[in-house]
Amino acid sequence: MKEMKKFILSTSIIKGIIFYDESRVSRLIEDFVLHIVGPIREEKPDILFFSTKTDGIWDEKNPLVQIRLSYDYEESQKKSNKARDYQELKTYKSESPDRPGARCPFGYSKLSQDKKDHTLIENDDAPIVQFIFYLYSFGYSDKKIALLLNESNVKSPSLESNWSDSTVRYILNNLWYAGDLVWFSRSSYENSKAKPIEERFLFPNHHKRLISPQLWATTQFLRSKKKNKDRMDSPFVLRDIVLCVKCERKLAVKNMTPAKAKKNYQYYYCKTCKRKINLEELHSYVFDDFTGRWGRELNNQTRTIKGIYSEWKKTIEAKSAENKSNVDKLRYKLSFVKPENEFYEDIKESFTLQIKSVEEERTKLLNVLEQIRVLSEYGEPLELISRFKEDIYKYNNEEKRSIFLIAIKEISIDFIRKNFIEINYRLTPFVEVETTIDKLNNKKDEVSI
Ligand SMILES: [Zn+2]
């Protein structure tokens, strides 16, 4: 491919390039646009591209071409998922030249058979996608969801095989379902790990979303929580939420139940002061308080959330304006450093790094602001909050754990005051946004420059 590029750039009579199928040029679809098409266009803007798969002139900026490339990319990702599942045979089979065209994301179909029409519509599988997100938001693991789908004979996206945890994970991580079209999501050619979202090439609100922003935010939060090997089905449903007031330390958990014992001896305990509280004592206090609170305050809660959104917006806008002014100040100061200065390069580098770091923080803030905008426009998170209203004792461990994680910020226990318990509830179910805002508010007094 590089040879061909060299040849094109060094030969003046070439007027056009015809390729067989852009998705076959590279496994990483965007490579072709970045490393081949881009440089050729830059040097020879008049060269025309054609593809056997598209009528007329091929243009990577055409949204239809982009959608096609993005499906091809997903297709290629699906293949690598399958490979990870040791299904090499099937992968090789689907690599054969007569494989059918790239498939749509699971839950969508093409509107018409016309090759030129790329419009997608939700199909009968769409509720399955929604169900997967719903189960995950209730604490179930990718594996358990796959198991449930297989037991219920739900048809999997790959007709040849059953649901696996990687298929479920793939669906849960696919921004397509949140209405966005993503490009350049791989870290690099060698590294298939997903890039941080702010570095990806995103077409937000590209199509109608299948998953509400509220459900999306919840599943993303639980995904990041589970990265720390959180066992959602453990009976210690309040672990890392409970704090020892005196030692300011999170409580650890211990199961001291002897084998065959009739009674459970499970404790939350402080590693510093060695004091402990029985699991049942703590749980029954918290469960009762939780039930009482949501019985009383549910109606107020949905009303106050609107006010919270606007408070959050103000906090972020203020911080982001401050960042912008810091960048301006840094640039202004840098402009006074003379290139003749013997430390010029070092000083310049130090300024550049500072500017970069402040700008990165600002990008993150603007992303959170966008998230708040989408959440607030979508209306009240009624479904999430209505989970709190149900009888908490009826939920299983995973469900309880997921509910407490999104409803409670912290529980503090004062062993000296006869195990006095205080519960600090969250303002909204959107943990990650709330945590960002809390951090900003705590940082407010610090001087950044
Ligand atoms: Zn302690």
Image (tube, rainbow, N blue to C red):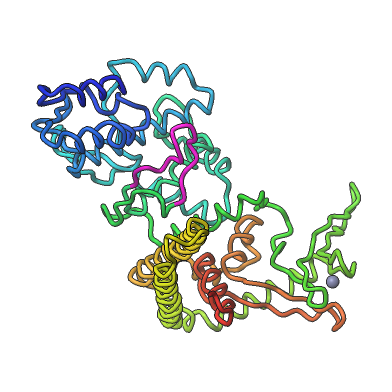
Res. 51 image quadrant: top left
Residue 147 x %, y %: 55, 38
Residue at point 51%, 52% (across, down): 135
| Image quadrant containing the N terminus | top left
Q: Quadrant of ligand 1?
A: bottom right
Q: Which of the pair 66/18 is nearer the observer?
A: 18
Residue at point 41%, 51% (across, down): 199
Task: Determine whether, in the image, residue 443 is placed left or right of residue 205.
Answer: right
- Determine if the magenta segment contains residue 192: yes
Q: Which of the pair 1/126 is nearer the observer?
A: 1
Q: Is residue 228 above or below residue 248?
A: above
Residue 358 x %, y %: 47, 65
Residue 85 x %, y %: 53, 27
Report the predominant secondary structure element of the magenta stretch.
loop
Residue 380 x %, y %: 40, 73
Residue at point 25%, 35% (across, down): 39
- Determine if the magenta segment contains residue 322: no
Task: Determine whether, in the image, residue 291 is placed left or right of residue 355.
Answer: right
Q: Is residue 256 above or below residue 268?
A: above
* Span of residues in magenta: 182-196
